[in-house]
Every structure is written in structure tokens, then in C-alpha cells.
């Protein structure tokens, strides 16, 4: 193990006897001590020895010790700052203590100083200094990592956007030409060949839905929409209007428990959230009963509303309650159409506004999706 470098102190006092006594105490405590008798000498020795701490007498022949402290503190960055322990005769203490601390001094002692108090104060300040330095260092590291993370997130979003956007074109070509061939050969196709075409078109249809949802998902992080006050009820109504045909076909009832609040968010994004939740309540309904959905809001804190969307569908087993928010995570096969992106999109939107989304459910018992949004 390499020995750690000695802690360097600069002991500044124009009174030779006091300076000598203090240096002896500090040397005996294991510090490397240099002496200075004036302000100019102090500034020169700071450059030469780069001390960890200066014990600085207030009264110096050429310069006020507090002024020396001010200059030292001003000229240095937080990560290369030097600790200053200002020392003064007790008769002047009160006024100087405030002035010294205003000038940036880290501590203050009155003469005469007990040797043990002197050493303990120096050690305590050094520990504080060390802790401050590591905090500055950690913060800087954190900033770098944060920037890197933001950059790679943006890259990833841009990649997902470009990839999904560019995939649409060839897919459309496959789908259009497959339909053309099928139409032109309609009369000569065997049942088996018709089945093949059906599977091609079904595959391209699913792929188109996947790309569409992926594009929406990658868009949410990119657009940086400003937040505005949104009436939850109008976002819910817009989602109901979008799904009107499917809701009616399933004989479903959407019950809004009044009043629904105003929240901070973006109208289009919130319509997407309710659209996904309502559309899931249709897809994952119990075959034997018509879907009933209840939408309700509760003030969960002075700053926040919790909005719940409860359905009477097939429910979700407890071990999947978190996983279903991951992109592409589905609990069902092709028998229920879907891409596995809807809930991931909801989560991304809600978390983008500083909220949370979760589900309360048990298998066969319906599901309640809850989301928190900032009260407007
Ligand atoms: P998708 O519906 O396209 O599969 P989602 O991300 O919307 O994708 O949902 C993920 C999975 O969570 C679904 O596949 C389904 O298994 C389950 N799920 C979502 N909503 C409900 C619900 N209301 N009731 C029961 N299961 C649900």
C-alpha cells in the first residue's frame, strides 16, 4: 500500500512566538507545517506548497488576514479550494468572526487556543473538506453519466424512429403486390394457395400494426411537448369517440364517475392513454359478460390526482402485474390481436409527466389501472 501524502498546513502569524508554538503543536500532531509572517508571503507560499489548510491570523503587518482569505477563496474553483481557519485575539472576536465567515473562512478560533482544541478543529475541518471534495467529484461524475445517458437515449429513440419509419415502405410494397397477385390469380388458386395468401396478408397486417405502435412509442420521448392544463373528461370523451364502434359492438358501458379533474399533461397523449386502456378492456373482456368500465379520480395528495380505469374483464395474475408494462410483453397469443406496446406507451407518457401507472388485479376478477397526474 502506498503511504498517503502528508497533510500540508500553512501557519500564518506575524507574532513569532505564537506562530512557533502553534507550528510545534501541529507538527507533533503529524502535519507538515510551513510558516508565513505576512500577507504577501502567504500568497507566495500558497502557490509554492499548495497547502490543504491555512491557519490565518487576522492581524498581519501588510494586509488584513480576512482580505487574504477573501482573495484565496475568490481565485479558486470548488474542487481546488483551500480551507481557511481564521485566528484572532479574543478581544476582537465577535466582529471578526462574522467578517471572516462572510469572506469565505471555513472556521474561526480565538486566541489563546488550547492545543487539543486546535488539533481537533484542524482535523474536523479537514474531514469536512474531504467530504466536500468527494461530493463535488461525485456530482461531476453524475453529470457526465447523466449527459451520456441522455445522449444514448436520444440516439436510441432516433434509431427506433428511423428504423420503424423505413420499415413501413417495403412492407407496404409486399402487402400491395401480394394482394395484386391474389386478385389476378383468384380464379386459378387452390384453397391451399388462398390460405397461403391469407397468411401473408395477416403477417403483413400484424407487422404494420407493430411498426405503427413502435413509431408511436418512439415518438413520445422525442416530441418534447409543452405541458398544458388538460380536462381529463375531454381526453376520456375523445378516446370513447375514437372507439365508439368497437364499444357499441361489444355492448360495453363506460361509466364516468363525476367529477373528473384537470391535470397537467398533453391532450393528445392523454387521449392515447385512455384509448389504450379502454381498448384493452374490450380485448380482455370475459366472453360471457358485456364489458363495464368505470373511470374515477381521487385526490391522492395536494399536488396529485389518481385516476383509475376499472374493468370487469379476465384480470391479470399477480406475477404479471409489472411485466405487462414492458414493451412487447403479452400474456396472450394471436387469438387476441395486439402488439404488446400499448401499456408501455401509457407508462412512458405518464412517467414523462412525473406520474406513475400500475395495475391492481387478480386473475378472473377484472383489472384496475391507476395513474397519477399532477393536479392543475
Ligand atoms: P397488447 O394489448 O397489444 O397485447 P398491452 O401493452 O396493451 O399490449 O398489454 C400487455 C398485456 O397486458 C396484454 O397482452 C394483456 O395480456 C395484458 N392486459 C392489458 N390490459 C389488460 C386488461 N384490461 N385485462 C387483462 N389483461 C390485460
Image: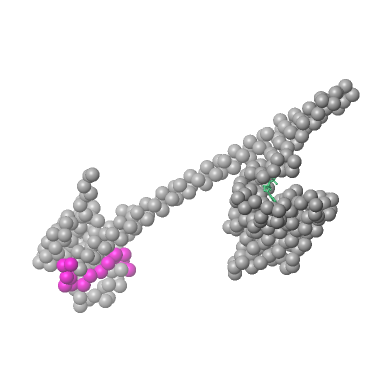
> Is residue 40 visible in the rendered structure shown here?
no
Q: Residue at x 68, y 65 (%)?
A: 297
Against 155, residue 10 (above or below) is: below
Q: Position of residue 221 (x, y in %)?
A: 61, 48
Please state if 357 lies on the left or on the right of 191 as rendered: left
Please state if 101 lies on the left or on the right of 281 as rendered: left
> Is residue 153 visible in the rendered structure shown here?
yes
Q: Residue at x 26, y 73 (%)?
A: 96
Q: Residue furthest bottom?
A: 91
Which quarter of the figure has residue 87?
Answer: bottom left
Give the quadrant of the C terminus.
bottom right
Q: Position of residue 345 (x, y in %)?
A: 65, 49
Asked if the stretch drawn in magenta spans residue 108, the answer is: yes
Against 56, residue 50 (above or below) is: above
Please state if 4 lies on the left or on the right of 227 as rendered: left
Against 221, residue 18 (above or below) is: below
Q: Position of residue 3 (x, y in %)?
A: 21, 47
Against 355, residue 202 (above or below) is: above
Q: Residue at x 17, y 70 (%)?
A: 114
Give the quadrant of the N terminus.
top left
Amino acid at each position: 500500500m502506498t503511504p498517503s501524502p502528508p497533510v500540508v498546513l500553512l501557519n500564518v502569524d506575524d507574532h513569532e512566538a505564537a506562530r512557533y508554538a502553534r507550528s510545534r503543536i501541529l507538527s507533533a500532531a503529524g502535519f507538515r507545517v510551513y510558516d508565513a509572517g505576512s500577507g504577501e508571503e502567504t500568497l507566495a507560499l500558497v502557490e509554492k506548497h499548495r497547502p490543504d489548510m491555512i491557519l490565518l491570523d487576522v492581524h498581519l503587518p501588510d494586509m488584513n488576514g480576512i482580505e487574504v482569505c477573501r482573495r484565496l477563496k475568490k481565485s479558486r474553483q470548488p474542487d481546488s479550494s483551500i480551507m481557511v481557519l481564521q485566528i484572532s485575539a479574543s478581544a476582537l472576536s465577535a466582529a471578526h468572526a462574522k467578517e471572516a465567515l462572510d469572506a469565505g473562512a471555513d472556521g474561526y478560533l480565538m486566541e489563546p487556543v488550547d492545543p487539543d482544541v486546535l488539533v481537533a478543529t484542524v482535523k474536523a475541518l479537514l474531514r469536512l473538506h474531504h467530504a466536500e471534495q468527494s461530493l463535488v467529484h461525485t456530482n461531476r461524475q453524475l453529470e457526465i453519466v447523466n449527459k451520456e445517458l441522455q445522449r444514448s437515449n436520444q440516439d436510441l429513440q432516433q434509431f427506433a424512429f428511423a428504423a420503424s419509419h423505413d420499415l413501413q415502405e417495403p412492407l407496404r410494397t409486399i402487402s400491395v403486390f401480394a394482394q395484386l397477385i391474389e386478385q389476378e390469380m383468384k380464379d386459378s388458386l387452390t384453397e391451399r394457395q388462398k390460405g397461403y395468401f391469407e397468411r401473408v396478408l395477416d403477417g403483413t397486417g400484424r407487422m404494420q400494426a407493430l411498426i405503427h405502435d413502435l413509431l408511436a412509442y418512439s415518438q413520445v420521448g422525442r416530441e418534447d411537448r409543452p405541458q398544458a392544463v388538460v380536462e381529463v373528461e375531454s381526453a376520456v370523451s375523445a378516446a370513447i369517440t375514437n372507439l365508439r364502434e368497437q364499444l357499441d359492438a361489444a355492448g360495453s358501458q363506460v361509466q364516468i364517475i363525476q367529477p373528473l379533474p384537470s391535470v397537467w399533461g398533453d391532450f393528445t397523449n392523454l387521449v392515447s392513454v385512455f384509448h389504450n386502456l379502454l381498448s384493452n378492456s374490450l380485448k380482455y373482456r370475459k366472453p360471457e359478460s358485456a364489458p363495464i368500465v368505470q373511470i374515477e379520480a381521487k385526490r391522492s395528495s395536494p399536488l396529485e390526482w389518481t385516476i383509475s380505469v376499472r374493468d370487469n374483464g379476465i384480470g391479470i395474475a399477480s406475477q404479471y402485474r409489472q411485466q405487462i408494462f414492458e414493451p412487447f410483453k403479452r400474456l396472450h397469443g394471436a387469438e387476441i390481436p395486439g402488439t404488446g406496446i400499448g401499456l408501455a406507451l401509457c407508462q412512458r407518457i405518464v412517467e414523462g409527466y412525473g406520474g406513475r401507472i400500475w395495475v391492481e388485479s387478480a386473475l378472473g376478477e377484472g383489472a384496475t389501472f391507476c395513474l397519477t397526474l399532477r393536479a392543475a
